[in-house]
Amino acid sequence: MYSPERPPYLRYLALIGFLVLATVGGGVIHPVVAVAPVLAVTVLWVILKVPIRYPVFAVTYLTLAVDYVAERPQSGLWESPLHPLGELLFAQLSYITKIGALRFPLIDVLVVGLMGLAMYRKVTKSTIDPPTPPMPRPLVAVTTLSLIALLWMEVRGVARGGDFKQSLWQWHQAAMMPFIVAMYHYSLRGPQDWPTLCRVVIAAGITKALVGSYFALVIVKSLGVFVEYTTAHSDSMTFIFCLLVVMLRFIEKPKAAHIIRGLGVVIIILMGMVFNDRRLAYVSLVGCLLAAFLINPWTPLKRFVVRMVPFLAPVIAVYIAIGWNHPTGIFGPVDTIRSLIDGQGGEGNLDYRDIENLDLIATWAQFPLLGTGYGHEFLLPVPLPDIAFVFPQFRYHPHDSLLGLFAFGGMLGYTGVWMYLAVTVFMAVRAYHRSDVSEHRACALIIVGIVASYINQVFGDMGIISYICTFLISMCVAMSGKLAVLSGAWPMPNSALLAMSPAAPVPPPGAIAYPNADGAPTPSSSANYGRRA
């Protein structure tokens, strides 16, 4: 006897009813238990149905947009509506669940889980996600080398009597970089996903800028206090990314639409930067634009700028000279320039950062080749103000993480950890000069700029232990590899082309395979690429 199939909506109603009952029942036990059924169904749905790039976009936005609790956002005076999410993502799960064994944050679970799911789908040849182009082998090698170097510094430090518990948080975020790179590599189809990724970062930057502006204009004003920053130190790198997207897209393809869409973004982001008041943000922006200027070919705009330099240089020199001793009003920017030269201790005096850098150099001098290893404090041959009442572990986490790498890892450790940055820039610049697609060229310049900004953050604001900085540099590492192989800057193995599109013929030597909207490669002549080299 024929039995008609039940309508699909009945299954959805039954599922919703189950979730409601489970949520209400779980709420009686604990608030965390109340959301567990919904989370479980969501995770199951993502695993079975959703292309992996979409949850990766969501995790990227949350990482960059919510309060980064590790850096005491809003100067520790106010918790924004995004603070609970920030605590959930970045605080140790042992703090949230009271389970002592869970001494890692939720963001680690999300990264490893998404990376594992993407790799599983690739191995099983799942059709949910389209094939992805391979990473250049040198980039894979140096990214792996970074993790190996960090582990070696950990082993060396502990073997020399270092504090194991303290050492884990000296390199934890940097060690997550290869995993985050793998997550982006296996989830992103190629440069066609770059515009969406930029929109995600810009949305996060606008969120942070608006939160910081509200804090500065409303909360701080009502409290009547002075604050050094509004959101967090690492947000400078997010702001720089947003500005670079707007500026470099226009430079590579000047048109009114880029100005109209970008003007609002620039205003909001600059407002967030001003209120956050980090000198490093302005230095990074200038450095990024200078890098783009040097890489850019001799366009009419570049020729115009070069020709104007001899005329503007005397005016700028006079402006700085006048404002040097009176850095107020229209000469306010001179105060930032002077503080970068004299330091916060004033002319002729060493400030905290100067003394700390001298102590790090002295620590490095003990073991110049191998370093002290992690788990050791840096030496204090020049006494520092004791800030242990605010930051008890300050001697394990120097502000200048770059010199910290030299002190803890020596020349070998430093080189092993940071070699991937040089290869990333190499791949991006080669891709820039071999692409005739303006969006791809802008992407390459943004990658180079973000590498420069990351180095500044590591040098000045402990960027190496920041998830925000680590996520931004990781997405750039992954995208530089995709740009390199799809622009012909690095050869793509024929086996990889066949795996991406078995029905398509292998392009002849010198041809470039750009993916179409479905992610499958399509042969494209490279006859025009050489003219930009």
Image (cartoon, helix red, strand yellow):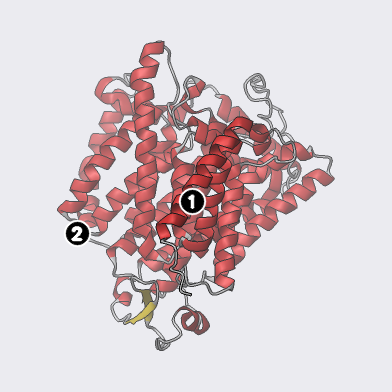
Position of 404 relative to 331 (above/below): below
Q: CA distance from mark 1 to mark 2?
A: 65 Å
Image coordinates for residue 247, horizontal then vertical, percent: 28, 49
For label 1, the SS is: helix
Q: Residue at x 64, y 32 (%)?
A: 29
Residue 154 shown left or right of residue 495 in the figure: right
Q: Residue at x 61, y 45 (%)?
A: 173
Residue 389 shown left or right of residue 131 in the figure: right
Residue 518 falls in which quadrant of the image? bottom left
Position of 392 relative to 136 (above/below): above
Q: Quadrant of the C terminus?
A: bottom left
Q: Which residue is mark 1?
A: 14
Viewer can see residue 286: no
Say which amino acid is labelled 2.
Pro
Q: Which mark is residue 372?
A: none
Instruction: Tell which residue pokes out farthest to the front in this image.
Output: 1
